Amino acid sequence: MELLTASTSRVYAKLGQAGAAFGVALVELAKQRDDIVVLSADMAKPAGLLKFSGLHPDRFFNVGIAEQNLVGMAAGFANEGFKVIASAQACFLSMRSYEQIRQYSGYMKFPIVYVGVSAGFALTFFGNTHYALEDMTLLRSVPGMVVISPSDPGQAMKALQQALTMDCPVYIRCTGVPGLAPLYTQEYAFEIGKAIQLKEGKDATVFCCGAITKQVVEVATELEECGYSVQVVDMHTISPLDQHCLQDAMTSRLWITVEEHFIQGGLGSAVAEFLATQFSPNRPFLHCIGVPNVFTVPGDYSYLLRTNQLDAASLKARFVSLLQKVADNE
């Protein structure tokens, strides 16, 4: 694949996370290995799979809107030694076919790469039936499942590339909408399971994942002008969490998690589970920011972030309030 540059990152951003991963990375990977098989639940066009399906019609199968059958077929191909990618809308892949994923990739350990397209609020006006806000809750509860929420399209490409080399099931959660500004504009080291420090800071540490990460970095940078020094960590792999990174951050008095996912069961819950095992008397305060556990009124992407207090202005106000509370308690 091409090196990540300001120019290539802008191109990938126009495609969105799934579009870049499938339209660019997958096409290149398929040239290097002929054991890749892709299954789609009627998602070839919106997922960016048209180029791959046109180049390799014998390695692409559209099963229709039948996610449970999608996973069953994927297990069959995996059993025959193929490297299988199963792609569908994140909401239906995670919820409708959860039992099949649990049995085939949990119990039977088939190393299928699941790609959930349009996770979070990406399907905007399709409404609550199409929002995937509990997919991380479900998938990270499957034993042995690796769960990744890339922070931008370039990282989604890297995640797919590495996932295909792993001998375990992987779920890649594609968030955001095409056209969002990229987070990474130059080449960097990416490793599944290893978090990336994006900004240093001593007053608090913010762990985030998904497309909202770039916005968090911008908010944290703005807070420097208000006298707050906030560290930001790209926690792209939710399962397994980077334990070393979390241990290193134990000196922060305040931890904040930010995700485009229900507060229950996602990144914040995973970090809370880690923190609960620490016996240090100086454990950080933890506050989890995400989508409240209620259904919301549909709208465009920016409206949905604003309504759920995940837009830049809301995040800045919430960070300041939390930092002030910690300062008042010391």
Image (spheres, grey):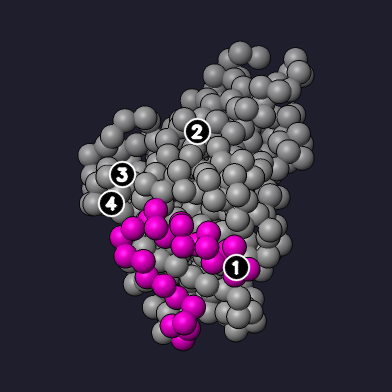
Task: Check disc 1 and give the amino acid type.
Answer: Glu
Residue 124 badge: 4
Q: Which of 151 and 172 is in front in this view?
A: 172
Residue bearing mark 3: 304
Residue 265 badge: 2
Mark closest to the chain's N terminus, 1 or 4: 1
Separation of residues labelled 4 and 2 (CA atoms): 22 Å
Q: Do the residues labelled 4 and 3 touch (CB within 8 Å)?
A: yes
Q: Which of marks 4 and 2 is in front?
A: 2
Task: Check disc 3 and give the amino acid type.
Answer: Leu
Separation of residues labelled 2 and 3 (CA atoms): 20 Å
Residue 80 badge: 1
Residue at 59% across, 38% down? 206
Q: Do the residues labelled 2 and 3 touch (CB within 8 Å)?
A: no
Q: Do the residues labelled 2 and 1 touch (CB within 8 Å)?
A: no
Secondary structure at numbered mark 1: loop
Mark closest to the chain's N terminus, 4 or 3: 4
Quarter in which the N terminus is drawn:
bottom right
Secondary structure at numbered mark 4: helix
Mark closest to the chain's N terminus, 1 or 3: 1
Mark closest to the chain's N terminus, 2 or 1: 1
Task: Check disc 4 and give the amino acid type.
Answer: Thr
